[in-house]
Image: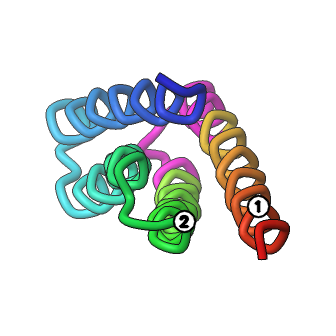
Amino acid sequence: MSILEEKSYNFSIRIVKCNEYLQQEKKEFILSKQLLRSGTAIGALIAEGKYAQSKLDFINKLSISLKEANETKYWLRLLKDCNYLQEKLALSLLDDIEHLLKILASSIKTAKENINNAS
């Protein structure tokens, strides 16, 4: 399992647990569902990319994953600023998503460079 796969999977677990907390403790169902959808899509798209049909398909999967990661960052910030998430938890999750965003962006860049160098 690559570092990106491992980090995104572990992040998904944290998002699922965060969703449970938001729904059970805070009785928040709308924003938490958005967070759950985008936060778990990151790893699912990375997993799909592992068996992509081509390099371009791989880049596409990672690019969509990057968009989902950016959306997840939005929901985390919103939940924090609306006081649904404690600052410590929110900052920890935001730190994780920033790290995933950087790894995804770097992976996409490298994959694109590899395509250009192969031509």
Q: What's drawn in magenta, residue-wise?
A: 79-94
The percent coordinates of residue 86 (x first, y second) are 52, 32
Quick one: SS at disc 1? helix
For residue 51, above or below residue 56: above
**Residue found farthest to the front:** 119
Question: Residue 116's spot in the image, x, y percent?
Answer: 80, 74
Residue 82 visible in this rendered orientation of the protein: no
Q: Which mark is residue 105?
A: none
Q: Is 59 drawn above or below residue 73 in the view shown?
A: below
Q: Secondary structure at mark 2?
A: helix
Name the quadrant containing residue 74.
bottom right
Q: Position of residue 65 (x, y in %)?
A: 48, 60
| Residue type at numbered disc 1 | Asn
> Relative to residue 66, is residue 17 depicted above or below?
above
Tell me, yes or no, whether the highlighted magenta stretch contains residue 83. yes
Question: Mark on residue 114?
Answer: 1
Task: Judge from the rendering whether residue 97 lies leftward or rightward of residue 44; answer left or right.
Answer: right
